[in-house]
């Protein structure tokens, strides 16, 4: 389990997908680990990675405080804020849950942990946004908006904390092969179904390298994802909204 002389990384949303791949990166590079997710499968992940697993619902303020209490026994070297969900625009209840998890809990946990990093004048933060932050998202409007928030918040936080020895990196992955589409019942869309997707391991590897290099942002992982991000910033919103709508419309 954890050893006091080794750096400690905390990864949220670590039961699958990018979060699990990030946890493996930290484990492979000599970090002690605390991994968190809302489902019981996080305990099996923790056992495989010789980590501490915390089963907690970060969509609630009590869940954020519970995780933070687990971190009080030693300083956090790296905080990877990866927990998040997507939602169809016709599912209001899930959209509101999305706002709680993707936005509110992001700010809440980031502030609790970075206040401690700031006092120590040391620490790194990785915030998982998405390339969709750059364009409108018909049929998944709240998700795209939440990722625009995550990017803006992360870059702003970086400039707030840089003079205090804390580095913040924003990860912007493209479409990635994770359970996120299945959990939101988006498998019938082109985006959630047949569209090619990046490997979470490749995304996590590029994210880890950027984080440790102190970069502001990293778009990962494939050439397709990087090109999509670049082109989307050049095209009018009306064009990107039309294309995105075709990819995310339920069939």
Image: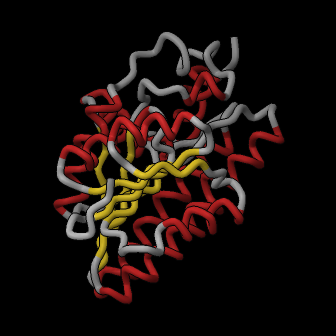
Visual colour scheme: secondary structure
| Residue in the foreground of this view, choosing between 226 and 153 | 153
Q: Is residue 82 left or right of residue 162?
A: right
In the rendered image of this protein, does residue 177 appear above or below residue 27?
A: above
Q: Is residue 132 left or right of residue 142?
A: left
Residue 150 percent location from the top left of the image: 51, 58
What is the x, y in percent for residue 109?
55, 67
Q: From the top left corner, tell me how far across and down residue 126 is, in percent.
A: 37, 58
| Rendering coords of residue 220 (x, y %) | 30, 39
Name the quarter where the C terminus is drawn: top right
Write down the quadrant of residue 106 in the picture. Answer: bottom right
Residue at the spot x=16%, y=60% of the render?
Answer: 213
Residue at horizontal 51%, vertical 39%? 42
Frontmost residue, 41 versus 148: 41
**On screen, 251 above or below 134?**
above
Which residue is depicted at the point 37% across and 40% down? 229
| Residue 212 visible in the shown view | yes
Quarter occupied by residue 164: bottom left
Number of labels in the image equals 0
Q: In the figure, 121 relative to 183: above or below?
A: below
In the displayed structure image, the side of residue 14 where residue 225 appears, left or right: left
Residue at 74% x, 47% y is 97
Quarter-of-image position of residue 118: bottom left
Q: Is residue 19 visible?
A: no
Lateral position of residue 70 relative to residue 206, left or right: right
């Amino acid at each position: 389990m954890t050893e006091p002389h080794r750096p400690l990384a905390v990864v949220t949303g670590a039961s699958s997908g990018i979060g699990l791949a990030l946890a493996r990166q930290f484990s492979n590079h000599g970090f002690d680990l605390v991994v968190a997710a809302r489902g019981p499968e996080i305990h099996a992940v923790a056992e495989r990675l010789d980590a501490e697993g915390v089963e907690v619902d970060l969509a609630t303020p009590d869940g954020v405080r519970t995780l933070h209490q687990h971190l009080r026994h030693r300083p956090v070297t790296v905080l990877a804020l990866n927990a998040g969900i997507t939602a169809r625009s016709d599912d209001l209840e899930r959209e509101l849950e999305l706002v709680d998890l993707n936005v509110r809990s992001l700010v809440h946990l980031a502030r609790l942990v970075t206040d401690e990093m700031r006092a120590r004048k040391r620490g790194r933060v990785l915030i998982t946004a998405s390339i969709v932050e750059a364009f409108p998202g018909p049929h998944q409007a709240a998700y795209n908006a939440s990722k625009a928030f995550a990017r803006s918040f992360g870059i702003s936080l970086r400039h707030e904390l840089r003079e205090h020895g804390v580095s913040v990196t924003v990860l912007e992955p493209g479409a990635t092969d994770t359970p996120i589409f299945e959990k939101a019942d988006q498998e019938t869309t082109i985006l959630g179904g047949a569209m090619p997707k990046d490997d979470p391991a490749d995304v996590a590897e590029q994210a880890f390298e950027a984080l440790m290099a102190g970069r502001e942002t990293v778009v990962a992982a494939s050439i397709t994802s990087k090109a999509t991000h670049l082109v989307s910033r050049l095209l009018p919103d009306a064009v990107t909204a039309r294309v995105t709508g075709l990819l995310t419309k339920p069939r």
